[in-house]
Image (spheres, grey):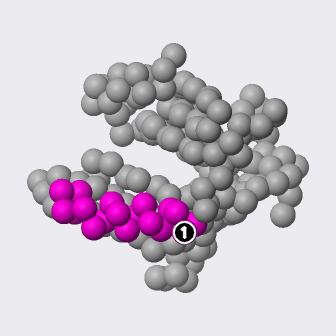
C-alpha cells in the first residue's frame, strides 16, 4: 500500500490520527539497507528557507535547537523495542522512553524512503531484566512545529535529523 494513502486514511479517523506519523527519508539505497545522506549544512539551509518563508511563518511556528538522543534497539517477544535516552538541559534530567514502532506501509526508491507508522509505548515493567542490544544510533534533531492560530497542538511537525548508527556504541 502507498504510505501516503494509508496516512491520509488514518488522518480521517479522529480516533487514530494523532498516533500516526508519515516519514520521508532522503539518502541512498544499498544492497541491504537504506543509508541517509543529507549533510547538516543542507538541513540548516532548508530550515532557514522554511522559517523565513512569510506564508509558513504566518501559521505560527516553533523551531527547536539541535538536540541529541541515543536509541538502543533490542528484541522483546515478537517485536523490537527502541529505548531512547535524551537529556533535558532545562532541568538537567535524563529522559527515557520505550516504544515499539509498527510500520503500516513502506515505499522504497533509489534515493528516498517513505513510511507510515505508529509507535506503541512499552512500560518499564514490560521490559526484560537484561537484553542484548542489537542496534544503536545517535540522533541529532531539530524540529519545526506548525500550527494554525486557533490550535493548541501542532498541525505538522517537521523533524530534521542526522543519524549515526551501528551494532554497538
Residue 6 in the image: above or below residue 139: above
Q: Is residue 45 left or right of residue 61?
A: right
Under tag 1, what secondary structure? Answer: helix
Name the quadrant of the C terminus.
bottom right
Image coordinates of residue 122 in percent, x first then y, are 61, 44
Residue at image point 54% right, 69% down: 41
Q: For mark 1, what is the residue?
A: 41
Residue at image point 62% right, 29% down: 108
Label count reads: 1
Q: Quadrant of residue 26?
A: top right
Query: Overall secondary structure of the magenta stretch?
Result: helix
**Residue 95 visible:** no
Q: Is residue 4 left or right of residue 82?
A: left
Q: Is residue 119 left or right of residue 100?
A: left
Residue at image point 58% right, 74% down: 87
Residue 6 in the image: above or below residue 83: above
Residue stretch rendered in magenta on the structure: 40-57
Image coordinates of residue 50 in percent, x first then y, are 33, 60
**Residue 112 visible:** yes
Residue at image point 52% right, 63% down: 42
Q: Mark 1 Cα within 10 Å, few/some/many (few <14, many 20+)? A: few
Residue 61 or 44: which is nearer the viewer? 44
Image coordinates of residue 30 in percent, x first then y, are 77, 37
Q: Quadrant of residue 46?
A: bottom left
Image coordinates of residue 164 in percent, x first then y, are 72, 60
Residue 66 or 56: which is nearer the viewer? 56
Quick check: is 41 in the magenta stretch?
Answer: yes
Q: Is residue 156 left or right of residue 7?
A: left
Quick check: is 13 in the magenta stretch?
Answer: no
Q: Residue furthest top?
A: 1
Amino acid at each position: 500500500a502507498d504510505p501516503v494513502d494509508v496516512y491520509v486514511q488514518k488522518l480521517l479517523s479522529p480516533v487514530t490520527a494523532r498516533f500516526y506519523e508519515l516519514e520521508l527519508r532522503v539518502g541512498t539505497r544499498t544492497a541491504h539497507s537504506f543509508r541517509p545522506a543529507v549533510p547538516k549544512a543542507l538541513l540548516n539551509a532548508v530550515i532557514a528557507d522554511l522559517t523565513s518563508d512569510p506564508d509558513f511563518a504566518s501559521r505560527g511556528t516553533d523551531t527547536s535547537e539541535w538536540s541529541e538522543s541515543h536509541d538502543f534497539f533490542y528484541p522483546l517477544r515478537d517485536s523490537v523495542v527502541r529505548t531512547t535516552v535524551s537529556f533535558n538541559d532545562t532541568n538537567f534530567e535524563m529522559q527515557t522512553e520505550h516504544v515499539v514502532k509498527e510500520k503500516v506501509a513502506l515505499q522504497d526508491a533509489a534515493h528516498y524512503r517513505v513510511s507510515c507508522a505508529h509507535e506503541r509505548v512499552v512500560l518499564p515493567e514490560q521490559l526484560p531484566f537484561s537484553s542484548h542490544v542489537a542496534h544503536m544510533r545517535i540522533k541529532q534533531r531539530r524540529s519545526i512545529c506548525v500550527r494554525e492560530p486557533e490550535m493548541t497542538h501542532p498541525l505538522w511537525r517537521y523533524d530534521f535529523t542526522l543519524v549515526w548508527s551501528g551494532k554497538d556504541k
